[in-house]
Amino acid sequence: MQQKHIVKSFDDELRHLHLVIARMGGLAEEQLANALAAISEQDSSLAMRTVQSDAKVDDLEREADAQVIRLLALRQPMANDLRQILAALKVAAAIERVADYAKNVAKRAIALNELPSVQPVHSIPRIGRAALAMLKDVLDAYNASDAEKALEVWNRDETIDDLYNSLFRELLTYMMEDARNITPCTHLLFIAKNLERIGDHCTNIAENVYFLVTGRQPGGERPKGGKDDLNVASPAKQAPQ
């Protein structure tokens, strides 16, 4: 995908931009894995470290933004170069949001670990593994400029939606059966929603990778699982209340 430029410093700047995004992706992936481990292992100290690590991703996003502005202002890129730079800007923003949702999962894990365990908590790892695998694969697709792999990830968003809808119904059942389950199940509901939103952002990255490589968007409508009015308000960017 990349081509050599007459001005070597332009290639160096592009490589630096891609390196920054690769570091962001690695940190976000680690953050999500740790947030999920904090739930399954009931490890509040790990959850707290995960929350604190989010600042590193924010710093890298600011660095990526500054690099994009510099490239646009000084290099006036066109064609494939412009697609690379704009895709990098969008991918960096999506990774930052993934890290925010992972941070929110970790915050909910801290609260959840202080409450009696409920059966639906064992359903979280399944949707968590799906989201983590989706994130890893789409980052690999971006780093390798692999349009086919990006399209494969794009088509997997429906799986996470279906897992979320199934868990949503399970949580409602537990809350209706016993009012004591309402608080822990509410935390689990927000965790599940954060994971579903991570899947959406992975799909956004996949679309950008596909466009970067091919110059066009994936054909057809974005695959989504059946919602059946199961949507709840997406958790805010900041910590859930």
Image: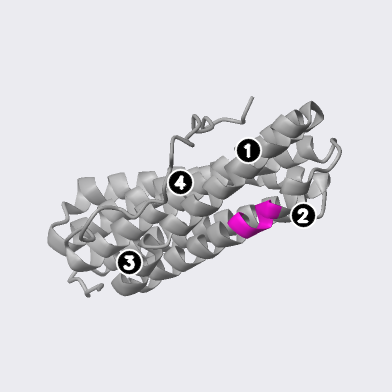
Q: Going from the N terminus, do you reach mark 3 or mark 4 first?
A: 4
- Marks 4 and 2 close (CB-CB < 8 Å): no
Q: Where in the figure is residue 85, as x and y percent of width and height? A: 27, 55
Q: Secondary structure at mark 2?
A: helix
Tell whether position 125 is magenta.
yes
Q: Which residue is mark 3?
A: 151
- Marks 1 and 3 close (CB-CB < 8 Å): no
The amino acid marked with disc number 1 is Leu
Q: Is residue 205 left or right of residue 189?
A: left
Q: Secondary structure at mark 3?
A: helix
Residue sitting at x 56%, y 42%: 194
- Marks 1 and 2 close (CB-CB < 8 Å): no
- Crowd band around label 2 with a 10 angstrom C-alpha radius: few (<14), some (14–19), many (20+): some
Q: Which residue is mark 2?
A: 40
Q: CA distance from mark 4 to mark 1?
A: 28 Å
- Crowd band around label 3 with a 10 angstrom C-alpha radius: few (<14), some (14–19), many (20+): many
Q: Going from the N terminus, do you reach mark 1 or mark 2 first?
A: 2
Indicate which label's residue lies in the foreground, 4 or 1. Answer: 1
- Marks 4 and 1 close (CB-CB < 8 Å): no
- Front position in the image: 63 or 181: 181
Q: Which residue is mark 4?
A: 61
